[in-house]
Image: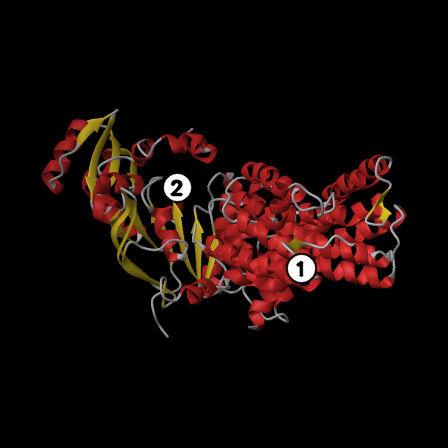
Amino acid sequence: MTTDAVVVRGLEKTYGDIQAVRGIDLTVARGEVFGFLGPNGAGKSTTIKILCTLASPTAGSATVAGYDVVKERDEVRASIGLVFQETTLDDYLSAYRNLLFHGELYDVPANDLPKRIEEVMRMVGLWDRKDSAVATFSGGMKRRLEIARGLVHAPKVLFLDEPTIGLDPQTRNGIWGYIRELRKEHELTIFLTTHYMDEAESCDRIAIMDAGKIVGEGSPEKLKASVAKDRVQLRTKDDAAAIAALKERFEIDAAIHEGQIRFGVTSGEEFLPRLFSELGAGIVSVSVARPTLDDVFLSFTGRAMRDAEASAGERNLANPAFRQRRH
Amino acid sequence: MTSDLRVIKVVWQRELLRFWKDRPRLIAGLVQPVLYLFVMGTGISAMVPVTSGVPFRTFLFPGVMCMTVLFTCFFSAGSLVWDRELGFMREMMVAPVRRGSILIGKCLGGMTAGTFQAFMMLIIGAIAGVPMTPTLVVTLLLESLLISFAVTAFGVALASRIRSIQAFMAIMQVVLFPLFFASGALYPLRGLPTWLEVLTRFDPLTYAVTPLRVAVLEASGQGALAPMVTWGSFVVPVWLDLVIVGASSVVALCLALPSFSRTE
């Protein structure tokens, strides 16, 4: 069956008076790395919980791997791998035992199970630590082990809720390495949430969530293009003449900021050759900056990601991973 | 069906691994009964040398054995609260399996742990001078299996409603000691003041201790003097005691399942 990996229609979730998710629509194609971006408290985790059958929607519907998350719970559960924000490993058991437990629980054929476990543990580089108790693992190793565990039963969709939160940059890069490898070598759909802008850039497609709603959706490139122009910064021998020339030849209103001429163009890279041929030898230096997802978030929500998080409340202040990021 | 059995097996195995790795608890679980049996039992023997036709320590032994099972199985059930606190519960909750299978696996784990400790108590009992026969050993172990399962089921029914390990510890104090003291584990069921007699008859543990005691007294040739449970003039036969224990475990499982199955 060639269905989309995740289809969400009009999904709502209300906890008491709080509307955590306010009617969202989503489609994630098979084999896609889909990023769910937004500040803490935007409703990302609630949405993931519903998709993983850990919470029931108040309204709307969702299917994962072609199965309805309410009516076909067990089928959904068998088709997904899950890595939560908090660890869900048994600290007292060895790494291998944790994966064995998982494989048996998911009814992986007994003959394939040892091979599967070795494969996924080698992938995350933990095979040589297979007999160590999980309690002796660092935070990064635990996360890697959880990703491995999520793959033991060969799921169709892997959900990663903030997979790299609180990890050092090297481990984060490592985890992204696995994610790319998984997409390339297995036909795996990856659905992840993040509030790191740079991670969202690595996704095939992202949806921006804010206050329970999806405010923007598309490839990182498309989203960036829809938002802002590339920013060109220019230094010349004669700034006044250059500004006049820009106005005359390209109808661009440029201005001087911090000693440089600055202006926006739709496609900076294509603009540069024309700029050189028109302005010629007067140019001392040029830089082109692409719009970032920070710019995208700002334009869709009207506030910077940082401010959106600051307003998400006291809860985050207790979260060391969050503090670390703010520094 | 086969996958249900597999789930039960793997949950059971994990319980046993954790029980076996937790040596301090394994040993601590035996210290208290040993104190009761050797120190308290010996002390009280000085006042009451013979009870129901046997030395007091022999009389006390089934009660202490029951206590061991009670505490071991309750701790075992408490691992559910740990699992929840440490997040591992989620791993089980999102799996495509029947919650009932996980529950049964947990109870079988507690049952095995409890029976293992009961077996250790048999050795300690033999050292304390309780006359042992092969029939007695087999009878006590079989009865321990049933009692352990029931106590674990009861513990799980409580544990699945409790969110923090501290609360579980507190509840254990409040629930276990009254259950134990009102069960007739430490004294005969006859000649009690009416209020205590009524209390013992309502304590499910009474029906767990009695078959153990009857078996021990029979092995000492004093079966006729065994203090059976009576309801008015009706003497409750041992088989009915065991049926009551079995039925309580079914009730406990039914109470445990809904709160255990709740999503988040």
Residue furthest toward the top?
A: A258
What count of labels does the image hold? 2
Q: Residue at x 25, y 47 (%)?
A: A213
Find disc 1 in the rendering and name its residue: B236
**Chain letter for the residue marked with disc 1 in the picture:** B
Quadrant holding the N terminus of chain A: bottom left
Find disc 2 in the rendering and name its residue: A196
**Chain letter for the residue marked with disc 2 in the picture:** A
> Which residue is nearer to you in this view: B132 or B5?
B132
Question: Do the residues at discs 2 and 1 belong to one chain?
Answer: no
Quadrant holding the C terminus of chain A: top left
Q: Is residue A299 left or right of residue A120?
A: left
Q: Is residue B173 left or right of residue B66?
A: left
Q: Which mark is residue A93?
A: none
* Residue type indicated by callout 2: Tyr
* Residue A112 position (above or below residue B62): below
Residue B135 rendering spot, x and y as whole percentages = 83, 64
Residue furthest toward the front?
A: B233
Q: Residues within 10 Å of mark 2 (few under 14, many from 20)?
A: some
Q: Is residue A45 left or right of residue B129?
A: left
The residue tagged with tag 2: helix, strand or loop?
loop
Residue A211 rendering spot, x and y as whole percentages = 27, 42
Residue B30 rendering spot, x and y as whole percentages = 77, 43
* Residue type indicated by callout 1: Val
Q: Could you give the CA–CA distance between mark 2 and mark 1, rounded to whole angstroms?
A: 69 Å
